[in-house]
Image (cartoon, rainbow, N blue to C red):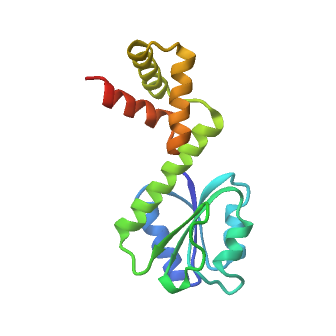
Amino acid sequence: MSSIVVAFPKTEVAQRIRKILMQSGYDVRAACTTGAQALAGIGGLEEGIVVCGARFVDMMYTELYEYLPEGVQMLLVASADHIIERDVENLVCLSMPMKVHELLQTIKMMEAEHIRRRKRRSGHYSEEDAAVIGQAKALLMERNNLTEEEAHRYIQKRSMDNGTGLVEVAQMILSLWSN
């Protein structure tokens, strides 16, 4: 699980969100009230999540975002009128008022994105994922008379074209063609 730093200008809000996340099994490193404290809490992490409000006494969320390490995502929890940035990488927005399940589902989605990125960077797959890719290649080789290299390139191309991972493409191939 990713390490999480919670940062809201009101201590009681930060503590309440921290408690919800910890009760749900998440590793919350810190509950902060300023942007500087949030950055200190993130210190040394290559990846993680900052759950925060829009304004702090020392900075806006846009400034905090600029100082975050590349692998750290931000979950901005604010009213719609405070959300300035849209379609920014590593920034997810959740409008107020929010429900607990919305918070937890959003964190879960962000963690899944961390896992996908980690797999892409490392190029390593679990035995189960490698088996799925291998089965899809075998199916392509059998049905389309492809070599293993050609089947792998086909899966890679579909992955890039669709913006999805190799495993997802392999699963799609298996579900469509394994009748």
In which quadrant of the rendered image does the C terminus lie? Answer: top left
Task: Please identify the residue farthest to the left as the structure is shown.
Answer: 179
Task: Between residue 127 and residue 179, name the one nearer to us.
Answer: 179
- Can residue 60 be seen here? yes
Task: Between residue 169 and residue 24, name the one nearer to us.
Answer: 169
Q: Position of residue 21 (x, y in %)?
A: 45, 63
Left or right of 141? Residue 116 is right
- Can residue 23 be seen here? no
Which residue appears at 55% of the width and 79% of the height? 83
Task: Please identify the residue farthest to the front as the structure is shown.
Answer: 144
Which residue appears at 64% of the width and 77% of the height? 61
Q: Position of residue 152 (x, y in %)?
A: 54, 23
Give the quadrant of residue 97. Answer: bottom left
Q: Position of residue 169 (x, y in %)?
A: 45, 34
Marker count (numbered): 0
Which residue appears at 64% of the width and 83% of the height? 56
Which residue appears at 61% of the width and 61% of the height? 89
Q: Position of residue 33 (x, y in %)?
A: 62, 79
Where is 50 relative to 54, above or below?
above
Left or right of 104? Residue 40 is right
Where is 57 relative to 144, above or below?
below
